[in-house]
């Protein structure tokens, strides 16, 4: 079994390499040396994923808890300020703290053992679960060498900071398996998890099979018969690369949309004809149904079936039909008018008092795409054909589809957009009729046109407030994601948009993610995504990005989004370039 120390050494080498090609070679060669189980685990670990996609929330380990555990092991708590001042990141701080031990342990941990113990910690529930989780974590760090502890911490807080993004890992996996990168990317679209792609490529069946080309245009890829136990598969149970998810199998990541400034720009990018749909300010859901059984997954691929019984009842009317549906759930008032995103999030993930919440906060399901139907994947079919099949499926059982038109002109599209905004929708989606469904990809086949200028950003730090906000973390440092490095780059701060109750809740949430504190600023694990409205973007020498938001305010917390789904620096730069007037910042 490969040692976890070997894994840590490879990660260390990745952090010292700036060449994308060399990084892919280094990671790919390491994965090729491992057995299938270890390679599956290492691929996820290397991008900072302790558990398989969709299971991460069960771990619930904060940077603050890790620091306290390691400080207790080493007795180095008093040197915290000095260590954090010298360390480049949280993982290095943990490494420095562990080096304070009078004697260093020998490297005995294996990759598989670390994965087993992460999974065991995630499974702990019930009475005193937090204490028992921390006890198991303490045992793990006590066994680890200083270098191993560095990367245990980095994986647990999902902040590897060595530049190995998911996209680069797919290139490394392609090198490991000697397969085309395009084929590996497609496998990832279907599997939704890097480790499972590794297993699929490394299985004897996959190695013996020829490369899997994309299905021809107009044809649907066959999928295996439904397996009622498919959702219970562990990360060690794989399938061949040619196998695609069944309607009761694990979910695929949702297709994403790129931003567009207005209807005219959507026509320029997509051409005519195109479709316009209401953009719903709700929560994305993926619904799998087969033989009367219904399972619902969130945007982050967590199962939320118990939280939405009315959706289960509605989709259950499909009976024996097998389908994977893409849609949105929104909260509505008594007249059916859409409410803000935060209202629908009251329902997500709740397993207690669901019936009471169902009465207090009604929801509506809107469907807008079809990913699989009756034994076949439909993602390679043109959007126009998928929508037609969805309409035929939904109509007999009164499932509601998002409002949609096929505008003949920009003027007709602008009228639809104006009516959508007046009705309380967030804006519209523009979709190319010939576009395939690309899971997890922000393709140019879908565009989002919002009424307000907003960005989804990550909170990376917060300042302690003063005056009325004393005792709260209330000035939030906002960052966009750098796709090239995986880092989060600050582009502004704000304390606006939240109520006193929100400040209290956010303070509690951020303190659980604390990794360092200096001069009144608490630095946190980049995990909380917020939707931020702003007036415009200006040049600014204050931030490494060279850009800053003006008059930023938080519209809401995007609990349905992970940090890797936040808007990127490229998106911010594109929005800056589109501004008709670019105000100069200080020194700009």
Image (cartoon, helix red, strand yellow):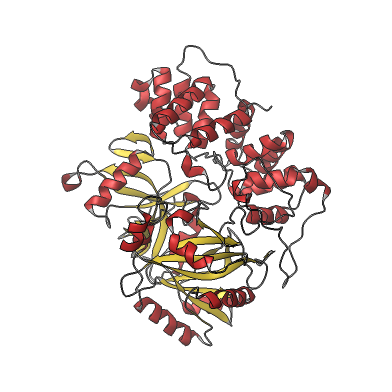
Query: Is 391 situated left or right of 130 in this image?
Result: right
Name the outermost residue toward the top. 102
How many marks the image carries: the answer is: 0
> In which quadrant will I find the N terminus?
top right
Query: Horizontal and vertical percent for residue 575?
Result: 45, 65
Query: Horizontal and vertical percent for residue 310?
Result: 44, 64
Q: Nearer the viewer, residue 541 or 409?
A: 409
Q: Nearer the viewer, residue 126 or 196?
A: 126
Q: Is residue 380 above or below residue 127?
A: below
Which residue is found at the position 59% from the left and 79% from the top? Answer: 271
Which residue is found at the position 48% from the left and 74% from the top? Answer: 400
> Can residue 533 be seen in this snapshot?
no
Name the outermost residue toward the left. 467
Q: Is residue 80 above or below residue 256?
A: above
Res. 234 image quadrant: top right
Which residue is found at the position 39% from the left and 81% from the top? Answer: 419
Query: Is 129 situated left or right of 214 in this image?
Result: left
Q: Is residue 510 above or below residue 406?
A: above
Which residue is found at the position 56% from the left and 50% from the top? Answer: 484
Query: Horizontal and vertical percent for residue 32?
Result: 73, 37
> Can residue 216 be seen in this snapshot?
yes
Query: Horizontal and vertical percent for residue 353?
Result: 35, 53
> In which quadrant will I find the C terminus?
bottom left
């Amino acid at each position: 079994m490969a040692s976890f120390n070997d894994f840590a050494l490879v990660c260390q080498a990745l952090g010292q390499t700036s060449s994308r090609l060399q990084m892919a070679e280094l990671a790919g060669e390491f994965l090729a040396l491992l057995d299938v189980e270890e390679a599956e685990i290492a691929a996820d670990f290397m991008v900072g994923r302790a558990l398989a996609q969709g299971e991460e929330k069960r771990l619930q380990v904060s940077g603050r808890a890790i620091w306290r555990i390691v400080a207790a092991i080493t007795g180095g708590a008093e040197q915290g300020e000095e260590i954090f001042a010298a360390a480049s990141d949280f993982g290095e701080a943990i490494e420095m703290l562990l080096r304070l031990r009078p004697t260093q342990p020998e490297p005995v941990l294996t990759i598989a053992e670390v994965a087993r113990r992460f999974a065991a910690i995630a499974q702990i529930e019930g009475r005193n679960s937090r204490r028992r989780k921390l006890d198991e974590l303490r045992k793990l760090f006590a066994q680890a060498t200083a270098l191993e502890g560095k990367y245990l911490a980095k994986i647990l807080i999902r902040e590897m900071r060595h530049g190995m993004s998911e996209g680069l890992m797919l290139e490394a996996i392609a090198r490991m398996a000697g397969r085309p990168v395009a084929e590996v990317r497609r496998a990832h679209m279907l599997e939704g998890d890097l480790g499972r792609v590794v297993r699929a490529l490394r299985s004897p069946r996959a190695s013996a099979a020829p490369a899997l080309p994309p299905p021809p245009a107009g044809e649907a890829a066959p999928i295996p018969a439904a397996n009622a136990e498919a959702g219970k598969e562990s990360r060690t149970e794989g399938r061949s690369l040619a196998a695609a998810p069944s309607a009761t199998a694990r979910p695929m990541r949702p297709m994403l949309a790129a931003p567009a400034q207005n209807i005219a720009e959507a026509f320029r990018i997509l051409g005519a004809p195109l479709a316009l749909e209401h953009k719903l300010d709700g929560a994305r859901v993926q619904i799998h149904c087969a033989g009367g059984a219904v399972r619902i997954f969130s945007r982050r691929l967590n199962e939320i079936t118990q939280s939405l019984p009315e959706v289960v009842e509605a989709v259950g009317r499909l009976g024996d039909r097998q389908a994977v549906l893409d849609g949105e759930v929104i909260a509505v008032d008594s007249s059916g008018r859409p409410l803000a995103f935060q209202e629908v999030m009251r329902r997500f993930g709740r397993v207690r008092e669901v019936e009471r919440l169902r009465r207090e906060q009604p929801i509506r399901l809107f469907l807008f795409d079809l990913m699989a139907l009756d034994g076949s994947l439909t993602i390679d079919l043109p959007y126009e054909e998928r929508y037609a099949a969805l309409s035929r499926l939904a109509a007999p059982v009164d499932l509601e589809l998002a409002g949609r038109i096929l505008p003949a002109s920009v003027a007709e599209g602008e009228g639809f957009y104006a009516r959508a905004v007046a009705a309380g929708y967030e804006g519209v989606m523009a979709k190319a009729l010939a576009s395939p469904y690309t899971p997890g990809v922000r393709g140019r086949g879908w565009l989002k046109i919002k009424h307000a200028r907003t960005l989804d950003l990550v909170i990376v730090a917060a300042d302690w407030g003063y005056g009325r906000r004393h005792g709260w973390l209330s000035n939030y440092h906002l960052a966009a994601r750098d796709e090239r490095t995986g880092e989060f780059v600050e582009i502004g701060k704000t304390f606006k948009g939240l109520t006193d109750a929100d400040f209290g809740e956010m303070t509690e949430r951020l303190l659980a993610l604390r990794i360092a504190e200096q001069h009144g600023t608490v630095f946190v694990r980049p995990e909380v995504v917020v939707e931020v409205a702003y007036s415009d973007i200006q040049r600014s020498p204050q931030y490494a990005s060279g850009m800053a938001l003006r008059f930023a305010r938080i519209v809401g917390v995007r609990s349905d989004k992970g940090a890797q789904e936040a808007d990127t620096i490229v998106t911010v730069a594109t929005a800056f370039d589109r501004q008709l007037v670019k105000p100069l910042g200080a020194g700009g």
